[in-house]
Image (cartoon, grey):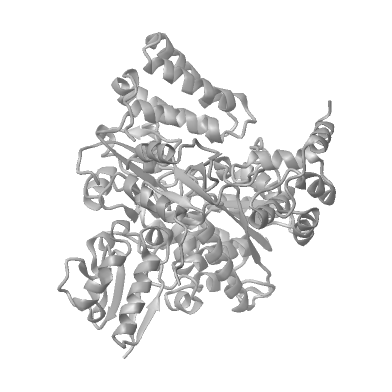
């Protein structure tokens, strides 16, 4: 079977994600805003993920048609890059640096602690949907490791204790008493 | 009287609470009815002192660090706003700090001193002098100056920049040419590109514009890794302001030539630091490595002649054009001319950016600048040049940092990252990680890299489990050779270097069973 046919078949069989988080119009808007740029596909995928939180599989045929590329082309690019996700993430995306400079400062122990504390492995989301855990291969904070990134904030010299405090802070809902 | 206070805004300072330190300072000033001007400067690259707070005084910029947010009130009470020395965190005039005094900061002369996006600051500290000189020269005149400087690619390959530029210049003029900046700084232990972009972005803009004038390119792209969102933000703002001031646009510096810049984000793929993979990615494709030839200088981005240089190579250009190639070439040794921005990282007490002429020994860097390991334990191994480079045992630390001297060891300088490990490191695990990393990040185009790395992890696991260790060690040696000789690019071709260095210098760790990691 040709790749594009397989992609066709898959899209037809896949349930459309819950309404509310995205619509074909949103995808069309983002593609239209960038499609005339040279090498537009990565900027388009970033724009979609920044807006919706992920790149829905249903976006693939729309992007393909508007860029006049095959669905296989688009799918191939999305799946090549670690950054793009095809399913929604938890409320917080937590990246742990696994690279050498952090290893030298206890990164492996931190990594184990994080997985134990959250009860998930890399690329998984906690059952309460609070955290999606991802590996990072260098956050560029190599003199002050081990480092993690929570959403867009990089935190240095993370100890297991500092990590636990952070998780508590992020998962504690604020109650306002009037 | 207005008091000027500086709190850095680079990623490392922020990762240690600089924003909160700035807020606390502002609150403390307001509570005392003081008129304080808070400047968010770049980092000076003395990372163990971050967040480093500076106060402008008649005797220079007096610094305190590392300042935790909770210490601000106490520091202010001790007279921080007057530059009072009566506090344990007092460091005196930061410009006189021995860590800075012992360096030769040519490229990084401005970082930490200026507000990164303030174009007036940049100009007041010598910015755009190189571009103005370049604008008065012919394209060949600019390329000749770069050749004279001896500048070699700082991304790792060390290819002479002048020759690359000449190749692009020599391509016919009646076609689109590009300048592409490789800002996909993925090597662990490196942060110099990030410092350029976050702390002195105009320097990169100036370097790229000069490259554009030199080769006849009218458009440039900066390919920034998606992990570096702050770099993109700083560059976008700096590009906007440079356009407003006529340093970018249709009429660069009023000399009638056009040059524009655009920042593009990568998407978390280490391989896109390889130049042909980066070009594929910029074109909106999977980051698969291209076969060379054709060279990107002849058929690069969208098939057009393209200069692809690393951030640090392009950042060195404004100094060269401002002071002359000869002045730059007076630094360094042998064929490694100019300065090398060394990034000292990992388990080290005083990590940071150390710009020095080529030729300094690794031991001097570790001892004089680093002041030993962070944990206070003996240093066991040092990985220089990123995840694809060798681990060096102490017997090799007296080698001068020079491309040729390191190549003789089967090692490399790469992008200048130096990652330090103390004696608790399990070198067998480091060898395994090299293969594992390659298996995660291989683009998959060639077999030795795609499959070799997976097999590499398996073979190392068998060796460490005591399963036919001797035979498997021979197999690992052969696998390494196959990857080195048979891979399409440096990813598969150099992944064996750290593995081979462990086999050679730390065989006892490789043969021992893995040590448990305590969570």
Q: Residue at (31%, 43%) from the top-left corner?
A: B400
Quadrant for the N terminus of chain B, please: bottom left
Q: Outermost residue toward the left?
A: B86
- Residue B451 rendering spot, x and y as whole percentages: 57, 23
Can the viewer see residue B480 in this picture? no
Nearer to me, B341 or A34:
A34
Q: Outermost residue toward the bottom?
A: B1
Quadrant for the C terminus of chain B, please: top left
- Residue B334 rendering spot, x and y as whole percentages: 38, 46
Nearer to me, B450 or A94:
A94
Note whether B517 is above or below B115 in the view shown. above
Note whether B498 is above or below B464 in the view shown. below
- Residue B121 rendering spot, x and y as whole percentages: 45, 77
* Residue A16 falls left or right of residue B169: right
Image quadrant assignment for residue B280: top right
| Count of numbered circles in the view | 0
Image quadrant assignment for residue B244: bottom right
Note whether A33 is above or below B41 in the view shown. above
Can the viewer see residue A113 in this picture? yes
Q: Residue at (62%, 71%) from the top-left corner?
A: B248
Q: Residue at (78%, 60%) from the top-left corner?
A: A29
Nearer to me, A33 or A49:
A49
Note whether B341 is above or below B515 in the view shown. below
* Residue B94 falls left or right of residue B210: left
- Residue B62 rendering spot, x and y as whole percentages: 25, 74
């Amino acid at each position: 079977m040709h790749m594009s046919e397989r992609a066709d078949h898959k899209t037809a069989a896949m349930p459309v994600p819950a309404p509310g988080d995205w619509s074909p119009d949103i995808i069309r808007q983002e593609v239209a805003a960038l499609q005339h740029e040279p090498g537009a596909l990565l900027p388009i995928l970033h724009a979609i993920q920044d807006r919706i939180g992920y790149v829905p599989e249903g976006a693939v045929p729309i992007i393909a048609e508007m860029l006049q590329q095959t669905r296989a082309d688009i799918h191939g690019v999305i799946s090549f890059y670690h950054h793009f996700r095809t399913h929604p993430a938890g409320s917080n995306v937590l990246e742990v640096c696994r690279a050498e400079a952090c290893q030298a400062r206890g990164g492996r122990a931190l990594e184990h602690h994080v997985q134990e504390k959250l009860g998930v492995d890399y690329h998984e989301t906690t059952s309460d949907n609070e955290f999606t855990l991802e590996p990072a291969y260098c956050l560029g904070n190599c003199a002050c490791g081990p480092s993690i990134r929570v959403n867009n904030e990089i935190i240095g010299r993370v100890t297991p204790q500092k990590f636990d405090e952070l998780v508590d802070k992020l998962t504690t809902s604020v109650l306002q008493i009037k | 009287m207005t008091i000027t206070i500086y709190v850095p805004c680079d990623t490392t300072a922020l990762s240690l609470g600089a924003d909160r330190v700035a807020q606390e300072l502002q609150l403390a000033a307001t509570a005392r009815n003081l008129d304080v001007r808070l400047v968010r400067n770049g980092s000076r690259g003395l990372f163990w002192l971050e967040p480093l707070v500076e106060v402008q005084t008649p005797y220079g910029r007096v610094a305190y660090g590392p300042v935790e947010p909770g210490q601000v009130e106490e520091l202010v009470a001790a007279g921080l706003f007057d530059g009072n020395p009566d506090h344990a965190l007092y460091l005196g005039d930061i410009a006189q700090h021995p860590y800075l005094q012992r360096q030769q900061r040519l490229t990084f002369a401005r970082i930490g001193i200026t507000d990164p996006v303030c174009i007036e600051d940049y100009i007041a500290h010598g910015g755009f002098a190189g571009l103005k000189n370049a604008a008065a020269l012919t394209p060949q005149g600019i390329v000749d100056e770069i050749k004279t400087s001896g500048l070699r690619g700082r991304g790792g390959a060390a290819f002479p920049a002048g020759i690359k530029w000449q190749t692009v210049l020599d391509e016919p003029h009646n076609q689109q040419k590009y300048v592409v900046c490789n800002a996909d700084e993925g090597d662990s232990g490196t942060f110099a590109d990030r410092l350029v972009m976050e702390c002195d972005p105009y320097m990169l803009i100036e370097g790229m514009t000069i490259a554009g004038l030199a080769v006849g390119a009218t458009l440039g792209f900066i390919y920034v890794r998606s992990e570096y969102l702050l770099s993109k933000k700083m560059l976008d703002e700096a590009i906007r302001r440079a356009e407003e001031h006529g340093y970018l646009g249709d009429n660069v510096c009023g000399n009638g030539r056009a040059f524009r810049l655009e920042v593009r984000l990568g998407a978390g793929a280490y391989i896109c630091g390889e130049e042909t993979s980066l070009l594929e990615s910029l074109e909106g494709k999977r980051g698969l490595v291209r076969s060379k030839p054709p060279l990107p200088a002849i058929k690069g981005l969208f098939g057009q002649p393209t200069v692809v240089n690393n951030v640090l190579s392009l950042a060195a250009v404004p100094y060269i054009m401002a002071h002359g190639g000869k002045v730059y070439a007076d630094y360094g040794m042998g064929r490694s001319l100019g300065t090398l921005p060394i990034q000292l990282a990992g388990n080290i007490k005083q990590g940071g950016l150390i710009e020095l002429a080529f030729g300094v020994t690794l031991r001097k860097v570790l001892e004089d600048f680093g002041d030993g390991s962070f944990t206070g334990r003996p240093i066991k191994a040092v990985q220089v040049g990123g995840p694809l480079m060798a681990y060096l045992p102490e017997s090799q630390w007296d080698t001068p940092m020079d491309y040729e001297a390191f190549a003789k060891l089967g090692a490399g300088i790469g992008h200048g990252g130096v990652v330090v490990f103390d004696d608790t490191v399990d070198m067998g695990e480091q060898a395994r990680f090299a293969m594992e990393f390659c298996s995660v990040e291989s683009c998959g185009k060639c077999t030795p890299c795609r499959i070799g790395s997976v097999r590499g992890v398996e073979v190392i696991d068998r060796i460490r489990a005591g399963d036919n260790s001797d035979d498997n060690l021979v197999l690992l040696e052969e696998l390494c050779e196959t990857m080195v000789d048979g891979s399409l690019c440096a990813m598969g071709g150099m992944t064996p270097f750290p593995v081979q260095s462990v086999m050679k210098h730390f065989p006892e760790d490789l043969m021992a069973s893995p040590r448990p990691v305590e969570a």
